[in-house]
Amino acid sequence: MSRVFTITAGLENMGAMKTGGQGSVYKGKRIGEIITAIKLLPTPIHSESDADKNFIAFTNEVEKLKKVNEKPNPNVVKILSSGITDTGNLPFIEMEYIEGPDLEELLQPPHEPLFTIKEVVKVANHLSNALAHCHKIGIKHGDIKSNNVKYNIHTGNYMLLDFGLAVMSDEQRRTSLRHAGAIEFMAPEQAEGTTLFETDVYSFGVILFELLAGTVPFPLKDKSETSRNQVMVAHLETAPPDMLQLRKQALPAAWSDEKKVQEMQVPAWLVNMIYRCLEKKPQQRFENGDVLHDFIWHNLGGSTSLAVVGANADALAQENRRLRHENEQLQLQLKKLQQEKASTAIVSSAAAPTTLQGSENSDYYTAYRSKKSSSGTWLFALLVLAGLAVAVYFIFFKEKELPLAERTPATTSSGKALVAEYKVVVPRAYFHDQPDETTRRNAWAIPSDSTIKALDERNGFIYTEITNHRNQVSKGWLRKEDLKTVQEAGRTTSPPPANNANTTPALNDEDVKAQLRTAQQLINSSKVQEALPIYENLLQENVPEAMYHYADLALRNENKRIDCKSAFELLQKASNAGHTVAKRTLGFLYVFAEDRYILEENNYYARCTFSKNLPKGSKLLVEAMVAGDSLAARYVRDLNAAEQ
């Protein structure tokens, strides 16, 4: 007969619920019919004094654990009390009793052998929220596994349970894990007795893998020590298997063909996230639950400042669908109105740009609110929307199609009469986008026999257009202090000699190739900063390959001489000039702009952010593939496979 413990006064032992290496969980009843769960730890405490190291360790860890409930979290079990049992002298933790099955039970018959994508995402959101809560206050759970996550049938939330390992000393934790831990969910570093925040992240990844594939990455064949060792070695050395292939094999036969197809459309961000959680090295995973939860919320389109779970998340999704429907209806009526009242819409557009000062959704909110009032006000709101659409087009899209000369004031167009002619008198006269020091570009003119024609003069700058020997045009503003008029330059008594280092003759194709080779050799030798001036010199010749390398280094955070916006524009310029690798890189950034894991893997995440444009990105990748770029061909194959 199993031993029955008296917990403490007013707390009745109603029988064991489960037993494991980290202790046993009993169902308890408090006076007043309050049902709780009690975690009994296996190491007895002989003296509640500083003389007993187990008591000291338990007391210290419990003090940390109390922080878990200082701010309630809907996905973390409440810790009610702790102490030493009246019989047996065993430390215990009393927790709220969660009524409902755990994840391990939900994967057993009569339930399906795996979860739907929707439910996996829900578990990911809830469990990462629990980890974020614990990690923020310094609590490492250390024992994340399927039967430590329960579904609360009353709230619809998934909840993290059993903080038994969290209150053990390091030595107790190592002993417990070595002999009785759930080896299938243990991170590689736990083989050495180390528990980190990233350890919980790894176990989180194992749980999601199991929910999607119907099995953990490295299953335990039996309970022998040999099997445990094999699984631990796999965690240390073996790459996780193909999760989607395992899912395909485990799809329930009872599901319709349509549902099977639908349930294989696992979002790429979710797959990448799980594999990142399962990285062997802790530093290659998400660093803690907070970062992990932010990643999930970002990909769900949520806000990291919210903690909406369960029914609230469903309500938010329903409201979002309703608003989208309203928006579609407004757009249809707007289109109809534009057709009937085209002239009125054009007149109304004149005042529309002022609405851009409001929030992102203010125009839609105004139209929606007006719909509830009189029809005249509602029609006015639609006209404002029409004007706003025109304004947005010209502000955000049309301008991007204009070359620099057309974006400058009308007085700077090439049709204006010549203001004056100048010569460069400094080693580098930098171009500026506007007559303002803060708009300097990494492009410059150098001293030569050629004259610079000033087409406009403003604020100590002149606007010019320079054509090099390749008939390539550079346009922009130059500082007057870097120049002298032709007359002033002619009066100079000591002109620079013909072989002056500041006077660089035009480069021929062989010179360009030689400089590109030199720059590449410097980069291969980790001398990036020495390569940058070479690329800058070639930028003056508008060499596409130099544009690509200079921009790519900036986007990868290895070139701080230009900002992200300028680097991306330079990459676009190289792509437009037909440089194949620039096309592939630009296409890659458009396609994977919102995939943090892939961007990080390719060193594009640390500095810059990008806007996703799948059609444009796909087109560029196809163009690069047709031009013979093998990496672009691989990206295209991956995209096609993801769509099938």
Image: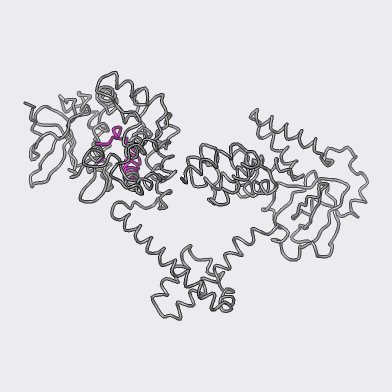
Residue 527, horizontal then vertical, whole percent? 66, 31
Q: Residue 127 lies in magenta, yes or no?
A: yes
Q: Is residue 90 visible?
A: yes
Instruction: Looking at the picture, tell me which residue is in the foreground, 401 or 19.
Output: 401
Instruction: Looking at the picture, tell me which residue is in the foreground, 382 or 518.
Output: 382
Image point (71%, 61%), residue name: 406
Instruction: Please state, as top left, top right, bottom left or bottom right, where the N terminus lies in the image.
Output: top left
So how many labels did they put on this image? 0
The quadrant where residue 116 appears: top left
Q: Residue 129 lies in magenta, yes or no?
A: yes
Image point (74%, 60%), residue name: 459
Residue 79, horizontal then vertical, whole percent? 21, 41
Report whether 10 appears left or right of 434: left
Decide: is 277 above or below 174: below
Residue extending furthest toward the left:
1
The quadrant where residue 531 appears: top right
Residue 15, horizontal then vertical, whole percent? 10, 35
Report whether 606 appears left or right of 463: left
Decide: is 296 above or below 86: below
Residue extending furthest toward the top:
226
Q: Is residue 72 visible?
A: no
Image point (89%, 53%), residue name: 488
Image point (68%, 59%), residue name: 402
Decide: is 432 above or below 354: above
Q: Which residues are magenta?
A: 126-149
Residue 441, horizontal then vertical, whole percent? 69, 49
Report whether 400 appears left or right of 80: right
Decide: is 348 above or below 433: below
